[in-house]
Amino acid sequence: MSTDHAPHSRPDAPMTVVVDLAGAPGPALPVLELRGPLDTHRLEAALDRIDRESARPARRPLWRHRLEEHGPGHHTLRLTARASAGSSVDFPAGLLADLLTDTPRHEEGARRIVPTSLQRELIADSDAHPGTGRHSEQFAFAWNGPLDPDRFTTAWQSVFDRESVLRATFEDGPEPQLVLHERITPEVVHLPHAATDWYALVEADRRRGLDPRGPGPLRITVLAGGPPGQDTPAPARVLLTFHHALLDGWSVRSLLQEFYRAYLADGALPGGERRPDIGDYAHWLTAQDTAPARDFWSRNDLAPATEPPAAALTGAGVGHARTRLDTEETERLRTWAAALGSPESSVLHAVWALLLYRARGTAGPARVRFSSTVSGRGIHFDGVERLPAPLRNPLPVTVDVDPCATVLAVLAGLRDEAVDRGAYEWVTAGQIRSWSGARDTGASGSLLVFEHRPCDPDGLTELLAAQGILVGSPETLGVRTAFPLTLVAHHGDDGGLVVTASYDRTRLGDADQVLADTAFLLRQLPGREGERTTVGEVLALLDDLPRPLAPGPDRTAGPPSDDTEVPPLVVLRPATHPGAGTVCLIQTPSTPHSVHTRVVRAYRGPEMIALLRPAAGSRRHEAVLRALREGPLVLGGFSGGGVAAYEIARSVAASGGRAPVVVLTGAATRPADFARTLEATARRSR
């Protein structure tokens, strides 16, 4: 076996393994090409491990191996079966490829901590839906006045140096870890005013998403205002993109205040690194006794999540819609709610509970359930109010809705529920589902987020204004969560209540009518007596309004499965001509989607490039790949995908097709180098 690309010469270069079934001496014994510095002791240890796991009855090795050296960093591993092994024992070449390419990454001075339960749940959900931008959020605000790009970038670097969470990345292994690096350079991009349309910029940034395994959980993009010399130059616009596995909305607003402080100090933030930090919080969390929370939620009868009001499906992707109450309407709502002993957030929860009840179409009392976030900052942890960390937490809310009951009774029930949940702000939805025995996946129903903002004790906006700089409050432009519908409420710069809806177009459709009904009831309720007005009377106000379509039969059973929601194979780049063949990348939890994107950009061959998301069993993959193939097929991936890739290759070969070649490389391999290896392998397969 030979290749036509340069061998790895650095002693610390990662290993790449090419598994060729076509050149094997038998159907169970592939030939492996090893590219990179080979540690023979590590190879022997890997083969010993395979022997121990495979030769249980005989207690002796089932295979012999021979290593052929072709030059520095280039070897061929050939296998032969012992007579006692028989012809039906398959050599686990995929496992060997994983073992040889899995190199631990160490950084001197980096701290490693165990991720929290919430972080693990968010990362797992992101990995299960690659390329969808799950759990990424965008904030935007206007910057009026002078803006020094160098000072702007230096100020953000100062914030990153101070806050360990901004230097955190997730690292996979036997036990997932959160690595706190000593230094990370933030991604700060300055674009001239004519570079792009603002809305096109936001959409492109949204499609790009944010990878929590890459450096920096916060991305900053600045679109400059109009050219100088105009009478009223347009303000610059700042876009902040972050991932919920490391930051929440409160955190980003708090970090923005730190940035303002650094900008006012010519880019240098005074003081050292913040403590306590996210590592201290993780340590505090592991010391908590979960027994009381387990007892509370195991006794809590969680009703199935209620599906939100539906409209006709409008396509794929994520939709966004927004509604506003003006300053006067918001003040009336706040005053009315306070007279009933409730905050305006509880009124929004009550309105949403009524709309969910209405969408069900029932006549008598019924229980509805949705999810709502808690800030996570009501815990007994010193400094938590200023701690940038992923503390915002979605927890289930159950409401009994009776048309004959008063609105006051609904508000009182929500208030009691909030008090009960407030004792367990650090408990995750996944833990609750486990303790309560709830059958739904947690990704059904809807999520309400009522954002509160940290105060500005130092008057930073006034200090900026003294230098001729006026900054607006950051507003969310939309968020992708695991829920079909997410409503985010916050107060705008004018004090008015703003509600933004983000929804999955494949599961919900249009959210405009839902938002219209929500705003209508928020405006109507302050004109009613909450102590006397019944739920039925409030719902009657909607009778003359257009009614959203009720959920169809295919929507009442819960959310679609992962296989339906995310296709198993996604085409990343089409072939240049028919019959060119396919390079299929295997998705692994430890490989960021951005890495696959860089591989595609660097690839110069004519083949189609696709991304396959492994699932249980290979029969489905086999059918998908057979349908795609018009020419040779190469399966490629990073360490951790070897077992799945090899299983798929063998399945395709066993069905009578031409056996795909498997190329596996280490996580440290540069995407451009991997692309060249894939090109060389694809050329040999033609």
Image (cartoon, grey):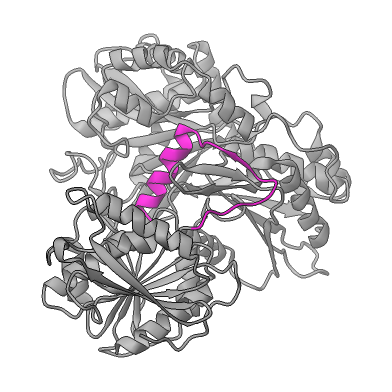
Residue 124 lies in magenta, yes or no? yes
Q: Is residue 491 above or below residue 310?
A: above
Image-based side of 205 in relation to 403, left or right = right
Instruction: Give the camera-side residue of 263 and 643.
Output: 643
Q: Quadrant of residue 414?
A: top left
Instruction: Give the camera-side residue of 579 and 355.
Output: 579
Question: Can residue 537 be seen here?
Answer: no
User: Looking at the rendering, in which quadrant would you find the C terminus?
Assistant: bottom left
| Stretch of the chain drawn in magenta | 103-131
Instruction: Give the camera-side residue of 329 and 242.
Output: 242
Q: Is residue 406 above or below residue 583?
A: above
User: Looking at the rendering, in which quadrant would you find the N terminus?
Assistant: bottom left
Q: Residue furthest top?
A: 531
Instruction: Give the camera-side residue of 118 and 684.
Output: 684
The percent coordinates of residue 25 (x first, y second) are 21, 78
Image-based side of 553 in relation to 384, left or right = left
Instruction: Give the tally of numbered discs.
Output: 0
The percent coordinates of residue 679 (x first, y second) are 41, 83
Q: Is residue 412 above or below residue 642?
A: above
Residue sitting at x 79%, y 68%: 230
Residue 115 lies in magenta, yes or no? yes
Residue sitting at x 58%, y 68%: 197
Image-based side of 446 in relation to 196, left or right = left
Question: Can residue 685 be seen here?
Answer: yes
The percent coordinates of residue 539 (x first, y second) are 29, 26
The percent coordinates of residue 168 (x first, y second) are 61, 46
